[in-house]
Amino acid sequence: MQQQQMMHATNATNLADILERVLDKGIVIAGDIQIKIADVELLNIKIRLLVCSVDKAMQMGINWWQQDPYLSTTAKDSALSKENAALQKRISRLEAKMK
């Protein structure tokens, strides 16, 4: 007869503590995959994974999501403004050529 153990709140607290520590300190997982045949490199994949909080990433100078138009409305507005300005210049040049 197997005895089932009850999960206590302390187990959940330990998991929460570990997650908080990982997000606060950060963790890096790195790996490389290389495929070679007869000393000829066919494929080289470098995998880098960083798990941390947004605050910790900003402290490390990592903020790529702020410039990504798919993730940031500020970046999206900036990209649209640049595209709009470029199109306005192009229209002006075309209108000048037509005169």
Image (cartoon, rainbow, N blue to C red):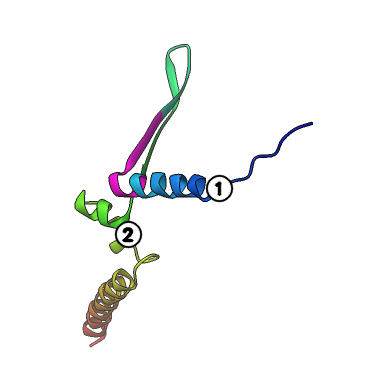
Sequence-wise first label, 1 or 2? 1
21 relative to 98, above or below: above
- At horizontal 40% and vertical 65% (from top left) the residue drawn is 70
- In the rendered image, the residue lying farthest to the right is 1
Determine whether the residue tagged by mark 2 lies in a helix, strand or loop. Answer: helix
Q: Quadrant of residue 31?
A: top left
Q: Which residue is mark 2?
A: 65
Answer left or right for 31 relative to 91. right
Task: Give the image location of residue 71, x and y in percent.
Answer: 38, 65
Provide the residue span drawn in magenta.
22-31
The residue type indicated by label 2 comes to: Trp
64 left or right of 43 in image: left
Taking depth in this image into account, of 87 and 76 the one nearest to the observer is 76
Image quarter hosting the N terminus: top right
Categorize mark 1 by other alpha carbons within 10 Å: few (<14), some (14-19), many (20+): few
Q: Quadrant of residue 44?
A: top left
Decide: is 26 above or below 80. above
The local crowd at label 2, few if under 14, some if 14 to 19, many if 20 or more residues have their Cα within 10 Å, is few
- Image point (36%, 50%), residue name: 20
Q: Is residue 26 above or below residue 89?
A: above
Which residue is label 1 attached to? Answer: 8
Amino acid type at circle 1 is His
Of labels 1 and 2, the one closer to you: 1
Q: Position of residue 37 (x, y in %)?
A: 49, 15
User: Cα distance, mark 1 to mark 2?
Assistant: 38 Å
Q: Residue at x 34, y 68 (%)?
A: 72
Task: Identify the secondary structure beneath mark 1.
Answer: loop
Tell me the quarter of the image containing the C terminus: bottom left
Q: Is residue 43 above or below residue 79?
A: above
Which numbered tag is attached to residue 70?
A: none
Q: How many marks?
A: 2
